[in-house]
Image (tube, rainbow, N blue to C red):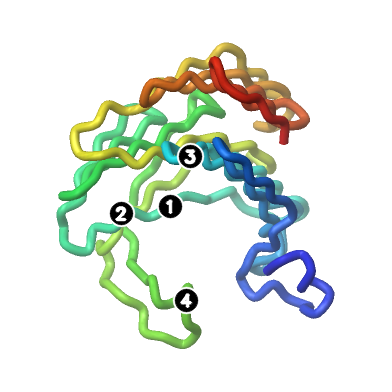
Amino acid sequence: MDHTERKNHISHHNRAEIVSKRFYKEIEYISSQGKRCYQPYLEQFLRQVWFVKPHYFMIRDRINLGKQQGNINTGFNLNNRDGQLQYKLEGGRLFASRPNSDLLVQIISPDQMGFTIEEGILHYAYHIVPDQMVEGEMGSTVRFNFNVLEGVNEVDLVYLIAPLKKGEKAPKIEINNIIIGEECILDGLQFQVNYRGHQDSFNFKDDLAFSRKDGPSYRF
């Protein structure tokens, strides 16, 4: 739901509201607020996505349960409908392989976080058209959940998603500085991504500074 539509809707009907967006030659940015997608409502679910064209996505999710009881459980599904998904986990680094492509997902912050794994159901139609049959059976996806510690009420998740050609070398990430404040909220994060001949630098604090070696710089 776009921010201009908000005044016409009491509920967000399971859709996040876009709150900011910027588009440049080298990088595109969009942020969305999803705290009212599902009941009970959260204090915060802000997702910020930077698409470093055409190479990879950098994502930050800020989740705050507010007064809600329970634990933070968030993650993503990978298609395994034909049983041909293969994957390897090394702490917070996931390398997945399908017959025609590969994928890297790497958690950058919190730097000690890993994944838990469970079976999931492919339900593409559910998200596109209401009241459609759910596709797939249990096990048609593999679900990777971010292993947020029990009792944590608020967290910043920063992670990279890089689609890869078959056999392509994955991005190399070098963390220069990371400062975790109360709960698991970032007070500062600096790192570099080396991939496909580019060296990109990210500096998270109150905002994000992005720069490319011998290239442009932007603030978001």
- From the viewer's perspective, tell me whether residue 22 is left or right of residue 196: right
Q: Which residue is mark 3?
A: 53
Figure label count: 4
Cα distance in 3D space between marks 2 and 4: 20 Å
In whole angstroms, how far apart are the C-alphas of marks 1 and 3?
A: 22 Å
Looking at the rendered structure, the kind of residue marked 1 is Phe
Q: Quadrant of residue 157?
A: top right
Q: Image quarter for residue 207?
A: top right
Residue of label 2: 142
In three-dimensional space, the C-alpha distance between marks 4 and 1, rounded to whole angstroms, equals 17 Å
Q: Which residue is mark 1?
A: 76
* Quadrant (top left, top right, bottom left, bottom right) of the C terminus: top right
The spot of residue 68 in percent (x, y) is 71, 56
Q: Which residue is depicted at the point 67% across and 55% down?
A: 32
Crowding at label 4, few (<14), some or many (≥20) Cα neighbours within 10 Å? Answer: few
Q: Is residue 142 above or below residue 96?
A: below
Which disc number belongs to residue 128? 4
Furthest residue toward bottom: 131
Percent of width and height locating residue 163: 35, 42
Specify the amino acid type for callout 4. Ile
Precedes in sequence: disc 1 or disc 3: 3
Q: Nearer the viewer, mark 2 or mark 3?
A: 3
Looking at this view, is 111 or 130 the one in front? 130
**Residue at 52%, 19% in the rendered image:** 192
Q: Earlier in the sequence, mark 2 or mark 1?
A: 1
- Of residue 167 and residue 175, the one placed in the foreground of this image is 167
Frontmost of labels 4 and 1 is: 4
